[in-house]
Amino acid sequence: MDAKLQRRIQRYGWDAAAGIYGKAWSKQLKPAHDELLNMASLESGMRVLEVACGTGLVTARAAKMVQPGGAVLATDISGEMIETTRREMDSYGLENIEVRRVDGEKLDIEDDVFDAAFCALGLMYMPEPANGLAEMRRVVKPGGKVAATVWGERRHCAWSGIFPIVDAEVHSEVCPLFFSLGAHDALINIMTNAGLKQVEQSRLSVLLSFTDAATLLSAKIDGGAVALAAKRFDKKTRSRVEISFLDSVDEYRRSDGSYEIPGEFVTAVGIV
């Protein structure tokens, strides 16, 4: 797919998901966020860049870690995500956060201005993730760290059936290579090729908990990568997608109607 078109799909797709994403995913993604922040080694006084900040699930935590004296610039390609993050940060009363709509592959930022940069579950949505990593490396000072988390291997993410199920109804090309960076040493390799040194990787297996089918469907269809495609569903199509997806994860449904669905995250960090 043309990179410009893919960026447009991602921008409008995450605009559509912005109102749901934060509440739907904050608990499920916390273990990955914990690992990312730990490997990024943020400290007080640091100036930090966040790429693909979404609704700010990591932003406030990073801002607190770099206090006093530090600051975070949170960026995302989605205008709705940026507005949501701005509102969330205002509610926390944090004054060391700037929020700006920026394409992660084309950062309008000078070289060597940040002490660290990180991206939580955003690289796999970029048409050219290598460009995103190269840009993060470019704007971080020598000796600083660049860290990123992506979803792991498809076979370890039991919810992955949502993509072919949706594409069978509405051809969306949401992210044709969604799981590619989670394979074996793919993230290490792409970070090394971007010029980062001493790259280390961590692989984390989790269970994604959802209280019931409605919560699960809202998260996966309306608050995730297929949100834009879901806007094109009529009632019958929506029903077919919901039934097919619930069938695909039925083995992970518990007796009380909740779900515990296996997932995997990969986090890597390198030095500029």
Image (spheres, rainbow, N blue to C red):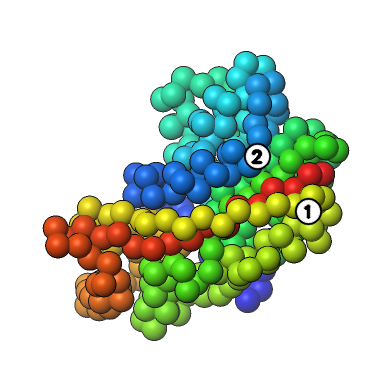
Instruction: Check the image and report above or below for 49 versus 194.
Output: above
| Residue closer to the observer: 253 or 72 | 253
Asked if residue 102 lies left or right of residue 154, the reply is right
State how far apart marks 1 and 2 are (Cα). 17 Å
Quadrant containing the C terminus in the rendered view: top right
Q: What is the three-letter code of the residue carrying label 1?
A: Ala
| Picture mark count | 2
Residue 266 percent coordinates (x, y) = 57, 57
Query: At 62% from the left edge and 57% from the top edge, which residue is drawn?
Result: 123
Determine which quarter of the picture holds residue 201.
bottom right
- Residue 235 visible somewhere in the drawing: yes
Residue 55 pos. (x, y %): 46, 42
Question: Which mark, by number, is residue 74?
Answer: none
Give SS at disc 2.
helix
What kind of element bears circle 1?
helix
What's the residue at 42%, 56% (across, down)? 206
Q: Residue at x 79, y 44 (%)?
A: 271
Q: Can you identify the residue that label 1 sits on?
A: 134
Q: Position of residue 194 (x, y in %)?
A: 80, 57
Q: Earlier in the sequence, mark 1 or mark 2?
A: 2
Q: Residue, x 39% and y 75% (percent of image)?
A: 161
Circle nearer the viewer, 1 or 2: 2
Residue matched to label 2: 40
